[in-house]
Image (cartoon, rainbow, N blue to C red):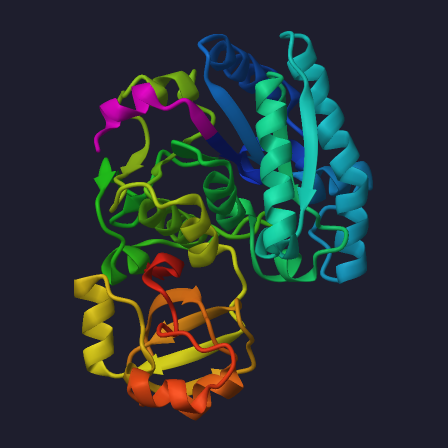
């Protein structure tokens, strides 16, 4: 996969950071939003599909309320989000409508992404909107979501949306030219692997109105790369940045996918489903899963943690506790604890009802 493959990308998720959207006093930069909407319209006319994951609601609310610093209390943050979200969407709609298109608001929480039925409902809504040439504008529902306001940004959400929508590419627009290293004096052109040294070179944000930073973007890029989605981090204020990226030009930092596209259900298992427990396996089982594409059998299970039932998502770790896979369990934690370490024949004698040869079938297992 190279930058030139971006020319063929049909469905693109564009994440817009607060640092790009908000200008002086945290006011929305309407001039930038008009230009951004014009870029989107040009891509839509080419037959591409665009999904926007947009931050900015809290900053917009801060501006409307005349606040100079990001509020610390959760109720104040939620109030800013409630006030600013309407303003943000109205601006998107006005800008896109002038170009002949509409903006469709979708507010989600992590629970919407983690619950399989709600996840599929969101997927169907997005696909329907794209079919009608509307632009889904997605944001975290900050008015009810505690964890996102306190700990995260929309970076990870954009990668999960790319998975949900089956996107070909994820473009993350920020206020720097890409992933910068060497005290921000040099931006990398291409990244094929996100390792510890790269993470250490990244920095968190120090902006008052923003959360996240380059480390959050690296985590989002890792999800995209592991799912088979091309990813670019670029300066959103560069002229015609979207067309430049999608024309294969050397704009921003390009993150090369590490694998072919994961199946839709496996993308959900790997990054969207909320694990209910943990299965610790021995070295033989780990090697069989990693190198031989085998299912997990009871004989390879060393320990069970947490409370889970049939069909729940579980984390799979080696003896050192490091997670290397996730999957859907065919057993409850209680039953699995009874047969851990047993041969298939002996396990069948213990589990009289609801016996499965595989603890986690390879079709329901994702290597991370």
Q: Nearer the viewer, residue 145 or 355?
A: 355
Q: Is residue 258 left or right of residue 305?
A: left
Residue drawn at x 32%, y 32% is 252
Q: Nearer the viewer, residue 66 or 105?
A: 105
Image quarter in which the C terminus is found:
bottom left
**Residue 144 position by quadrant:** bottom right
Q: Does residue 163 show up magenta in the picture?
A: no
Asked if one can make out residue 319 in the rendered structure from this viewpoint, the answer is no
Count of all numbered marks drawn on residues in the image? 0
Question: Which region shows up in magenta?
Answer: 1-12
**Residue 268 placed where, x, y %?**
48, 52
Image quarter in which the N terminus is found:
top left
Q: Nearer the viewer, residue 77 or 289?
A: 289
Q: Does residue 8 show up magenta in the picture?
A: yes
**Residue 6 placed where, x, y %?**
31, 25
**Residue 240 placed where, x, y %?**
43, 16
Residue drawn at x 56%, y 50% is 153
Q: Is residue 190 left or right of residue 203?
A: left
**Residue 230 position by quadrant:** top left
195 versus 171 height, above or below: below
Residue drawn at x 31%, y 72% is 296
Q: Nearer the viewer, residue 278 or 103?
A: 278
Asked if one can make out residue 261 in the rendered structure from this viewpoint, the answer is yes
186 versus 242 height, above or below: below
**Residue 212 placed where, x, y %?**
51, 52
């Amino acid at each position: 996969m190279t930058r030139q493959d971006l020319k063929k990308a049909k469905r693109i998720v564009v994440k817009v950071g607060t640092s790009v959207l908000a200008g002086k006093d945290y006011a929305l930069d309407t001039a930038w939003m008009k230009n951004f909407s014009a870029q989107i319209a040009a891509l839509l006319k080419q037959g591409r599909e665009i999904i926007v994951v947009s931050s900015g609601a809290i900053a917009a609310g801060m501006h409307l309320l005349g606040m100079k610093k990001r509020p610390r209390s959760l109720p104040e943050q939620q109030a800013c989000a409630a006030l600013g979200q309407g303003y943000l969407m109205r601006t998107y709609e006005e800008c896109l409508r002038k170009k002949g298109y509409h903006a469709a608001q979708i507010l989600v929480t992590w629970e919407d992404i983690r619950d399989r039925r709600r996840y599929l409902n969101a997927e169907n809504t997005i696909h329907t909107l794209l079919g009608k040439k509307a632009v889904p504008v997605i944001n975290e529902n900050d008015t009810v979501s505690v964890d996102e306001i306190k700990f995260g940004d929309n970076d990870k959400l954009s990668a999960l949306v790319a998975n949900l929508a089956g996107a070909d590419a994820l473009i993350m627009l920020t206020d720097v030219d890409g992933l910068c290293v060497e005290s921000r004096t040099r931006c990398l052109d291409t990244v094929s692997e996100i390792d510890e040294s790269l993470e250490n070179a990244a920095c968190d944000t120090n902006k008052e109105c923003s959360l996240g930073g380059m480390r959050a973007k690296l985590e989002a890029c890792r999800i995209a790369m592991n799912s088979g989605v091309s990813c670019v981090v670029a300066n959103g204020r560069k002229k015609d940045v979207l067309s430049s990226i999608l024309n294969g030009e050397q704009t921003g930092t390009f993150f090369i996918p590490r694998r072919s596209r994961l199946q839709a259900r496996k993308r959900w298992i790997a990054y969207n489903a909320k694990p209910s427990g943990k299965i610790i396996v021995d070295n033989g089982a780990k090697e069989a899963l990693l190198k031989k594409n085998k299912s997990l059998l009871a004989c390879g299970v060393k320990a069970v943690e947490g409370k889970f039932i049939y069909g729940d998502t579980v984390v799979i770790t080696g003896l050192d506790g490091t997670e290397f896979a996730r999957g859907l369990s065919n057993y409850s934690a209680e039953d699995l604890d009874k047969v851990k370490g047993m041969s298939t024949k002996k396990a069948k004698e213990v589990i009289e009802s609801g016996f499965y040869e595989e603890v986690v079938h390879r079709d329901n297992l994702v290597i991370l």
